[in-house]
Image (spheres, rainbow, N blue to C red):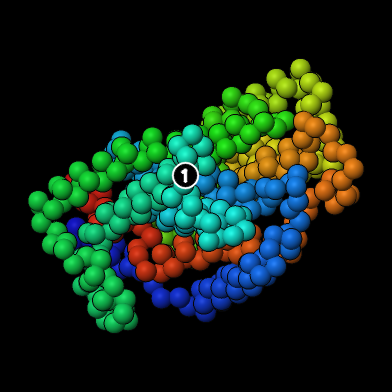
């Protein structure tokens, strides 16, 4: 009886909840940002890429920075789920679905922002019709598409037992939402045979997504490394991108953990212990990423080849120096210092550190793209002054902010429709603990 009562209490605590005033305002703000971005994109379609400040030299601007950021933050979502499930890490149960939702939302807008960057979206189908396997671009299309569908399935399959639970509470949902639940879980009866089959499918997806996740970041790094530019001509880029993706993805999960814990009062399920353990993980990932940053810059700085001298000087002491040192200090060094102390691994300090990591990571992606393009191997001669500098136009900012808002909107809607924390897995884990 005690286990039954605890199970019912878990269900009541973790059922999806309707948005109150604060939630509706949040949805409204995100929707408004997306609409402004849609208008900016309409202007870009009508007048062309001339409305942006991208020119012959800086042909990749804030759009590609956002693309790399989205790809990075999606990594840990799927990997956390895969590793926790394969290793049977029970303490990670409350975090898996949060991570899966972040992965799905981020990879969706990584794909969308690439189409925005193309300028002429009708050319997108040419990637599938005339794509050349020799090009890293077609590799990126293949792995992103594969990664998206595996992430979607990895979100869906563990949801099936929870959907069966949701169908018991018809009175709590609108008729449309209830029909949606019935459609999603129509074939799920919850018998032992289905459970075993689902477990095998989830394990297969977890195994498959690990190499795919590593591949997507490696291939994305090759888009840069195979382009002959100062700062990109590096064999370190694959590991450098993966290390950075681990860090920002973990930071994003920590931010989401705190928001959901506070907003939905889930202190019993997302505990200070979870923050403490994720804080230790963040320290390790920060030190790993710091190592790759040192490795990335120390070798060319020691050689100081003429082609890379102006690029490195601009990055370390020139016009990009404030942004560069802000990204390094805020996104890597300060989080390590804070998290080394137990007080720094409490929920609120962890939330602040998570924001620092995510913000620092976005600026770091911007710095990967822009300074290099402004320092080509062949020096600029007889070009308009606008070609020597790059600062995004309002249309670029609006579209970039809309893509960020769109990602958060997808995650918010997923949290409204589905349980943020797996209900059945939490009940099973609680039952094992009581035993």
Residue 96 point in image, percent of width and height? 37, 49
Q: Is residue 252 left or right of residue 379?
A: left
Q: Is residue 29 visible?
A: no
Q: Is residue 10 left or right of residue 312?
A: left
Q: Is residue 42 left or right of residue 372?
A: left
In percent of the image, x 41 and y 76: which residue is there? 18
| Of 106 and 254, the residue lying toward us | 106
Residue 423 quadrant? bottom left
Q: Is residue 120 visible?
A: yes
The secondary structure type at the circle numbered 1 is loop
In percent of the image, x 64 and y 37: which residue is there? 332
Local crowd at mark 1 within 10 Å, few (<14), some, or many (≥20)? some
Residue 238 point in image, percent of width and height? 54, 31
Report the residue that reaches farthest toward the front.
130
Residue 118 point in image, percent of width and height? 60, 55
Q: How many marks?
A: 1
In percent of the image, x 67 and y 35: which residue is there? 333
Report the residue that reaches farthest toward the top.
303
In percent of the image, x 47 and y 44: which residue is there? 131
| Of 373 and 247, the residue lying toward us | 373
Residue 213 quadrant? top left
> Which residue does the numbered mark 1 point to in the structure image?
131
| Of 182 and 353, the residue lying toward us | 182
Image: 420 above or below 245: below
Residue 409 point in image, percent of width and height? 51, 66
Image: 140 above or below 394: above
Q: Is residue 90 left or right of residue 124?
A: left
Image: 304 above or below 166: above
């Amino acid at each position: 009886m005690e286990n039954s009562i605890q199970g019912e209490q878990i269900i009541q605590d973790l059922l999806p909840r309707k948005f109150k005033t604060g939630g509706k305002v949040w949805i409204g703000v995100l929707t408004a940002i997306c609409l402004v971005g849609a208008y900016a994109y309409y202007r870009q379609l009508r007048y062309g890429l001339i409305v942006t400040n991208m020119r012959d030299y800086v042909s990749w601007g804030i759009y590609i920075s956002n693309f790399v950021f989205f790809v990075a933050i999606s990594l840990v979502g799927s990997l956390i789920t895969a590793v926790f499930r394969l290793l049977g890490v029970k303490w990670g149960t409350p975090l898996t679905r949060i991570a899966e939702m972040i992965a799905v939302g981020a990879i969706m807008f990584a794909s969308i922002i690439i189409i925005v960057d193309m300028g002429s979206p009708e050319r997108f189908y040419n990637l599938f019709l005339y794509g050349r396997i020799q090009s890293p671009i077609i590799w990126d299309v293949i792995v992103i598409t594969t990664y998206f569908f595996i992430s979607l399935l990895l979100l869906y399959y563990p949801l099936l037992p929870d959907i069966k639970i949701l169908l018991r509470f018809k009175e709590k949902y609108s008729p449309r939402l209830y029909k949606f639940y019935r459609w999603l879980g129509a074939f799920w009866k919850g018998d032992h045979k289905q459970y075993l089959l689902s477990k095998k499918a989830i394990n297969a997806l977890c195994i498959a997504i690990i190499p795919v996740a590593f591949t997507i970041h490696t291939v994305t790094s090759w888009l840069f490394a195979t382009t002959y530019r100062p700062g990109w001509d590096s064999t370190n880029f694959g590991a450098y991108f993966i290390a950075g993706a681990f860090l920002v993805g973990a930071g994003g999960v920590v931010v989401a953990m705190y928001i959901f814990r506070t907003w939905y009062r889930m202190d019993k399920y997302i505990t200070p212990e979870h923050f403490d353990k994720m804080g230790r993980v963040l320290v390790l990932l920060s030190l790993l990423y710091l190592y790759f940053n040192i490795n990335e810059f120390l070798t060319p700085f020691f050689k100081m080849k003429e082609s890379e001298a102006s690029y490195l000087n601009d990055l370390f002491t020139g016009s990009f120096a404030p942004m560069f040192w802000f990204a390094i200090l805020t996104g890597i060094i300060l989080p390590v210092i804070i998290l080394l102390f137990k007080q720094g691994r409490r929920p609120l300090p962890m939330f602040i550190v998570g924001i620092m990591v995510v913000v620092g990571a976005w600026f770091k992606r911007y710095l990967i793209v822009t300074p290099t393009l402004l320092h080509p191997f062949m020096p600029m001669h007889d070009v308009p002054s606008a070609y020597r500098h790059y600062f995004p136009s309002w249309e670029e900012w609006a579209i970039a902010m809309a893509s960020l808002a769109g990602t958060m909107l997808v995650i918010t809607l997923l949290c409204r429709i589905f349980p943020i924390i797996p209900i059945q897995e939490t009940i099973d884990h609680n039952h094992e603990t009581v035993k």
